[in-house]
Image (spheres, helix red, strand yellow):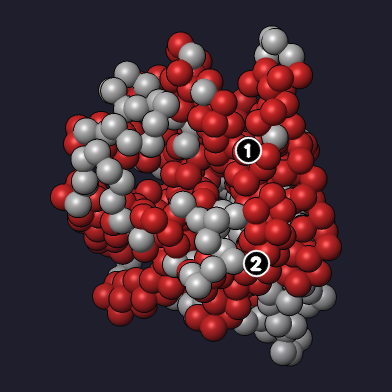
Amino acid sequence: MAGHKHAGALSPELTPDALRPPPGNPRFPLVDGLRAVAALCVVVTHTAFISGFNGHGELGAITARLDVGVALFFVISGFLLYRPFVAARHLARPAPRVLLYFRRRALRILPAYWLALTVLAIWPGLLLVHSGTWWVYYGFLQDLRVPWIEGGITAAWSLCVEVQFYLLLPLYALACARWLSGRSSAVQARAEAGALVFLAALSLLTRTLFFDDPAPDTVANTIAGTFTWFALGMGTAVLSVRWHATPVAQRPVPLRVLARRPGAAWVLSALLLLLVTRIGMPTVTITGYDGRDWFFGHVLYGAIALCFAAPAMLGDPARGGVPGRVLGWRPVAWLGLVSYGIFLWHQPLTGKFIGVQDWTTHGSFIVYTLVVAGVATGFATLSYYLVERPLLRFKDPPARSPGRTPGGDPSEITRDEPPRTVLGIQPPTESLEGRVGRP
C-alpha cells in the first residue's frame, strides 16, 4: 500500500505539527483516535463519579472503570516516545537528540497546561493555586503529596507522572543503547523484553508494597507506581520496530492474528473491562480499595489499554476492521488532535455544570456529560488553534543542509522503512523539501 487508507487518517502532507513524529520516524494515524478515546473515557468517568451515576447498576459499574483512559494515555506515551530510540538502535542510525526531544516535549505540554491552569484558577476556581504552593502546580509536582493532588487541576496528577516518564526515558534509552547496540534485532528484542518485564514487575511490586488501605498513597501516583503501564507501550514499540517490515505471514502467531482479526483485540479489551467490574473495586468513592483489587485492577487496566491500542500500533492497515474504521473516522481523529486540551479543561468544569442535571428528569447524566464534554472541547479548540499550534511549529529545527536531517540519513531511512504501510504505520515522509510526520 502506498499510504494509509482508513477513513479519517490525515495524509502525511497535512499532518499537524502536534502529531508530527521526530524526523525520519513513521507516523501512526490511528493513535490519534486512541487519544480521543482516552480523553473521553476520563471525561465520562469523572462526570459519572460527580453525578453519582457510578452507583447505578451494571452501566454505572462500567463508567466507574473508564478511568482506564489514564492507562491508555500511558501506553500511548510509552509507545510513541520510545519507538524512535528503539528504531535508531535497531537500524544503527543516530539516536534522537536529547535536547531536541525535551524541546518537543516542552512545547507539546507546557503552554497548554500553563494556560489552562491559569485560566481555570480564575474561573471556575482551583484550590491551592493562588497560595504559597503555586509552584507545585506550575512545576508538575502535585503528585508527590496526596494533599497536593486535591488542588490545581486534580486530573493533572497523571500529567505529572507523564513528565517524570519524559525525564527518565532518555536515560533508559541510553542504558539500552550501551547494553544492546551492535547486536541483532532479534537479540535486542528478546533482551529488552526481559528488561521491561522486570521493571514492570518491580513497579507493580512497589505499588503493592506501598498500598495504604484505605487511604490513597503517594507512590501509586508517581512513575514508581505506574511504570507498568508505560512499559506495556514501550514493549509494543520494541515489537513494532522488530517486525515492522516483515510480511504478515512471517510474523509471530499473535501478531498474525492481530493483523488478520484486529477486532478480536477490542473484543478481548471489552471482556477484560467487564471482568474488572467484577473484582470488587469501589465505584462511588476513591477509597475503599483492598490489596487484592488494588493489584489486579492495575494489572487488568494495563491489559485493557494494551488490547485496545494494539490494532492501532501493531495492526495491518489493509485489514483495519472495526478498529480502523472507528479510530480513523475524521471526527474521532480531530478529537484526538485536541484531546490534550479536553483532558486539561474538563475536570474543573464537572463541578461548575453539575446543575445541568436539573434540566431533565430523564437522561440527566447524559446531558451533564455532553455539556461538560462540549464546553471542554470548545476551550480545548481555542487553546489548540490560538496557542498550541503556533508554538508547535518550532518543535523541529529546519534542516541544516539539503538531503540531511537531524537524526539520520534520508536515504538510509528510505531503505530501512519501505515505501508501504505496515503494522499500522505510514512510512516517514522525509524529503529535500521538508518533513512531515506526529508528536
108 vs 243, nearest the viewer: 108
The outermost residue toward the left is 209
- Measured as percent of width and height from the top left, residue 381 is found at 79, 51
Give the alpha-carbon distance from disc 2 to disc 1, as whole Å: 20 Å
Q: Is 71 above or below relative to 372? A: below
- Measured as percent of width and height from the top left, residue 203 is found at 25, 54
Few, some or many C-alpha atoms within 10 Å of disc 2 (few <14, some 14-19, many ≥20)?
some
Q: Residue at x 50, y 56 (%)?
A: 151
The outermost residue toward the bottom is 401
Q: Is residue 341 visible?
A: no
44 vs 438, nearest the viewer: 44
Q: Residue at x 52, y 49 (%)?
A: 155
**Quarter of the rendering occupied by the C terminus:** bottom right
Which of the 4 quarters of the picture holds residue 271?
A: top left
**Quarter of the rendering occupied by the N terminus:** top right
Few, some or many C-alpha atoms within 10 Å of disc 1 (few <14, some 14-19, many ≥20)?
many
**Is 192 displayed left or right of 123 in the figure?**
left
What amino acid type should be assigned to the residue bearing mark 1? Answer: Thr
Q: Is residue 226 visible?
A: yes
Mark 2 or mark 1: name the one nearer the start of the chain: 2
Q: Residue at x 70, y 35 (%)?
A: 353
Find numbered disc 2 in the image and state the secondary structure of the residue it sits on. Answer: helix
The residue identified by callout 1 is 350
- Measured as percent of width and height from the top left, residue 176 is found at 32, 72
What amino acid type should be assigned to the residue bearing mark 2? Answer: Trp
What number is the disc on residue 114? 2
Looking at the image, is mark 2 or mark 1 nearer the viewer?
Answer: 1
Find numbered disc 1 in the image and state the secondary structure of the residue it sits on. Answer: helix
358 vs 338, nearest the viewer: 358
